[in-house]
Amino acid sequence: MSFTLAIVGRPNVGKSTLFNRLVGKRLALVDDQPGVTRDLREGPAKLGDLSFTVVDTAGLEDATDDSLEGRMRRLTERAVDEADVCLFLIDARVGITPVDEIFADILRKRGGIVLLGANKAEGRAAEAGLLEAWNLGLGEPMALSGEHGVGMPELYSALLPISERFEAQARAAEEAMPATGLDVSEDAGAEEEAAWAPSAERPLQVAVVGRPNAGKSTLINKILGEDRLLTGPEAGITRDAISLKIDWAGTPTRIFDTAGMRKKAKVQEKLEKLSVSDGLRAIKFAEVVVVLLDAAIPFEQQDLRIADLAEREGRAVVVAVNKWDLEDEKAEKLSALKEAFERLLPQLRGAPLVTVSAKTGRGLDRLHAAVLKAHEVWNRRVSTARLNRWLGAMIEAHPPPAPQGKRIKLRYMTQAKTRPPHFVVMCSHPDKIPESYSRYLVNGLRVDFDMPGTPIRLVMRGQG
Ligand code: GDP
Ligand code: GDP
C-alpha cells in the first residue's frame, strides 16, 4: 500500500511541472486512464526508491463557470480529502500572495500532514520568498524547483517517514497487529545522501563551460571516447540546452554541452541557432560546473565572468586548466595559477583547481574525482547540533562587534537547505552584523566542515 500526495497551490506556482517530474515518462499512460477527471490529474510517482500516487489540481486556469476562488477551494478540499499528504506550493520568486494565504488557511483547517514547498527556488531570486514562507505557519519550507530538480532530496526525506509509516501500517494490517508507528530516525540525513548519490535514474549533472577554444569539445569527446557514448545526443531538459548521458568512469553522468560538441554530434536545425549564452543556460541545469581554462591564457575576463556566474547560481565549481601538455615549467606555472585564482576569484575560495590535457587525457581521472567530491559537498547536510557547538566556539574565539555599545546576540543556527549548503543564523540585530563577520563564519564553515568547491550561503535572521 502506498500513500497519496496531493500537490496544491494557486495557479502558476509550478504544480504541473512538479507533477510531471514526479510521474516522469509514465505520464502518457496516466492521461489515458479512465476515471481520471480532467481537473484532478493523478499518476504513479517515483522519487528515489519511494513509490506513491501523486494528484495534481491542475486545470484551474480554465475555470469559466464560476468564481476561481470557489472552484479552487472545492478542488483543493477534494484533493486534500483524498490525499494522505499535501504538498502546498508557493512561488518563491513572487513571495506570499493573498491567494496563498487562503490556501494556507484551508490546509490548516483541514489538518493532516502538510508539507510546504517554496517552488522555483533555483538561483538567488528566490531567497526572500523562501524566508517569507516561514510566515505561513506551516513549518519549515523546502526550497524546491520542479523545473530544475532542486530540493528533491529534501522532498524525499520528508516523504520517507510517511512512506515507512504506510508500509508499517500495511504490514500491521496483514498481520492483524497494531502498527508500531512512525520511525523518524535522527539519521535521515545519511539515508538522504546515499539515496542522492548519482545513479542511472538521477545522473550527475555536469556542465563544461569556458571560452571558445578552451578545449571543451575536445574534453567531452575524450571522455566519451574512453567511456563510450551510451545514449545519443538528445534534447535536454528544456529546448535550449542539450545534454549527453554518459557513463563517466563508472558514474552515470549527464553532460551539458555549450558549444562544439553540437557540430561533431551532427545535431542541426534549431540547435544550430543557439548562441554563446547557452553556456550560461547550461550552468542553470548543472549540479557541478567545470570551468575550463586554457593554460596559455587563464583567467581572462570571460572566464572570470562565467566562474562568478556559476557561483552566484549556487553551483558546485571545479576549475580545470587545460592544454597542460603544452606547459614546460609546470611547478612554477601551477603556483602562479593558484595565486591568480585566489586573487581574482575570492568568492570561489577552496574550489579545486585541476590541471588536465583534453588532448592526451592526462588528469581526467583527477578531474572526475574533484567533480564527484564537489557534488558530495554540495549535497552535504550538517546537523543542527554540530553547527551550534561550532557556532559557540566561533563566537568565543571572536565575538560579534557591539555597534554603539549594543551587543549582537547570535542565538543559534541551522542548515536550511543543501545544493548548495544554505545556513540561517538567528540573531538579535541581523542588519547590524558587518559583512566581515559573515565572511568569518562562512570561511570557518568551509574549513571546519571541509566544504571545498561549493558556494556557501549564510543568512542572518532576526526573531520577530
Ligand atoms: P501550475 O499552474 O501550478 O500547474 O504551474 P505550471 O507547472 O503550469 O507552471 C507555471 C509556470 O511556472 C510555467 O511557465 C513553468 O515553466 C514555470 N515553472 C514551473 N516550475 C518552475 C521552477 O521550478 N522554476 C521556474 N523558474 N519556473 C517554473
Ligand atoms: P572549444 O571551442 O572550447 O570546444 O575548444 P576545442 O575543443 O574545439 O579546442 C580548441 C583547440 O584547442 C583545438 O585545436 C584543440 O585541438 C586544441 N586543444 C584542446 N585541448 C587541448 C589540449 O589539452 N592540449 C592541446 N595541446 N591542445 C588542445
Image (cartoon, helix red, strand yellow):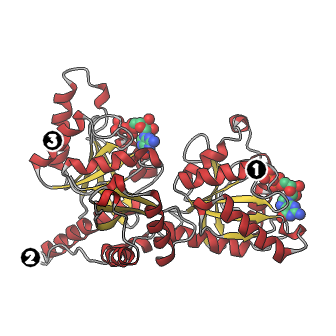
Residue beneath disc 3 = 77
Is 91 left, or right, of 276 in this rendering?
Answer: left
Amino acid carrying mark 1 in the image: Arg
Q: Residue at image x 56%, y 55%?
A: 311
Query: In this view of the protein, which residue sits in the foreground, 86 or 370?
Result: 370
Query: Secondary structure beneath disc 3?
Result: helix
Disc on the earlier residue, 2 or 3: 3
Amino acid carrying mark 3 in the image: Glu
Residue 379 visible in the displayed image: no
Q: From mark 3 to mark 1, how far is it between C-alphas?
A: 53 Å
Residue beneath disc 2 = 178
Where residue 384 is drawn, which disc sits there?
none
Q: Nearer the viewer, mark 3 or mark 1?
A: 1
Q: Residue at image x 28%, y 31%?
A: 60
Q: Position of residue 404 (x, y in %)?
A: 32, 56
How dense is the environment of label 3, judged by Cα within 10 Å: few (below 14), some, or many (20 and up)?
A: some
Question: Image height check: is 438 above or below 303?
Answer: below
Q: From mark 2 to mark 3, how far is it between C-alphas?
A: 30 Å
